[in-house]
Image (cartoon, rainbow, N blue to C red):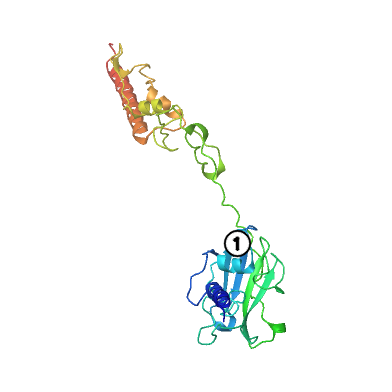
Amino acid sequence: MSRRAAHAATVVVLTAVSSVSWPGSPAAAAGSAGYCPDASGVTVVVDFNELGGGTVVRCASGTQATGLAALKNAGFEITGTLRWGEGFICRIDGKPSAASEKCVDTPPASAYWSYWHAANGGGWAYSDKGVLNRKPPAGSFEGWSFSLNRNASDAPRPKVTPKRPAPAPPPPTSPPPAVGGGPAAPPPAAGGGPVVPPAGGPGRTTTVPPAGTPGVTSAGTASASVAAAPPTAVPTTTPGGVTGSSGGTASEPAVTEVAASGSGNGGLPLGTIAGALLLAALAVGGVVTARRRRAADPDD
């Protein structure tokens, strides 16, 4: 072999080896978990099926040049074949294992990663192009589903519906605070009636005694103070020597203002009424005694 041919063979081998991502090699980009939030990226779905691991959804943000770039930029770790490099996807995230698949040549049709694509809200379609020949549109879906012991015509579609979830509604806004920082409005009164401020102006309260309280009349506390005072009578001496109450005659004893105030709405206490009756009885007794003395002493 000539030196030129040997050099060319070395370049081909080095190029093939450098293009292979061996098991355990890190992914080119991390991407983000879940669906892409808008149409600016490509959502990649990987369904492991019989390999175990469920179905994983990740987002490759931004424009993706090829299906291979979308798979890597979404954050999946991939392994190509020794013969064809990353033009054939042999493993995704280390599956199938190196014990079951050596990744030297094209994987067999009975155990390989099938390649799918879909528009947002559409249906999965089997890709008729290779991973290096397809440019996924922005906002679309790329799908990878492992097909085991199936024909190419019945390869399983990814089990995730290619549709981005609707965006969450914005949180409710709280009402703005009161303008000017004034005091809050008073709570409504019981029963739904209007709120009435207390009488007497700010800083003063008015206490109203309950209805039926003894000594309280419609005139307020002034009547109560009058009714509570003990009844008194100023004795006066008449020319005939008869002692009676002021404001009346000997035959008609005067009734005090305390007794007269009994016509009020609240009434008088029982002790006040008894005192008034006692004074009246004493006055009548005095009149009777005076008449008897006058009858016994004709000279007067």
| Position above or below: 104 against 65 | below
| Position above or below: 275 against 142 | above
* Residue type indicated by callout 1: Cys
| Position above or below: 118 against 177 | below
Residue 128 placement (x, y as % from top left): 72, 74
Nearest the camera: 132 or 186?
A: 132
Residue 85 placement (x, y as % from top left): 58, 75
Name the residue: 63% across, 59% down. 63
Q: Tell me the quarter of the picture where residue 4 sits.
A: bottom right
Residue lying furthest front:
2
Residue 66 placement (x, y as % from top left): 64, 66
- The answer to whether residue 293 is seen in the rendering is yes
- The answer to whether residue 91 is seen in the rendering is no
Residue 78 placement (x, y as % from top left): 55, 74
| Position above or below: 32 against 223 | below
Name the residue: 38% across, 29% down. 224
What is the total number of numbered labels drawn onto the structure image?
A: 1
Relative side of 167 to 215, left or right: right
Q: Secondary structure at mark 1?
A: loop
Q: Specify few, some or many for label 1: CA neighbours under 10 Å numbering under 14, 14-19, or 20 or more.
A: many
Q: Tell me the quarter of the picture where residue 255 sits.
A: top left
Q: Which image quarter is the N terminus in?
A: bottom right
Nearest the camera: 288 or 159?
A: 159
Q: Tell me the quarter of the picture where residue 10 sits.
A: bottom right
Name the residue: 33% across, 21% down. 287
Nearest the camera: 223 or 297?
A: 223
Q: Which image quarter is the C terminus in?
A: top left
Q: Mark 1 highlights which residue?
A: 36
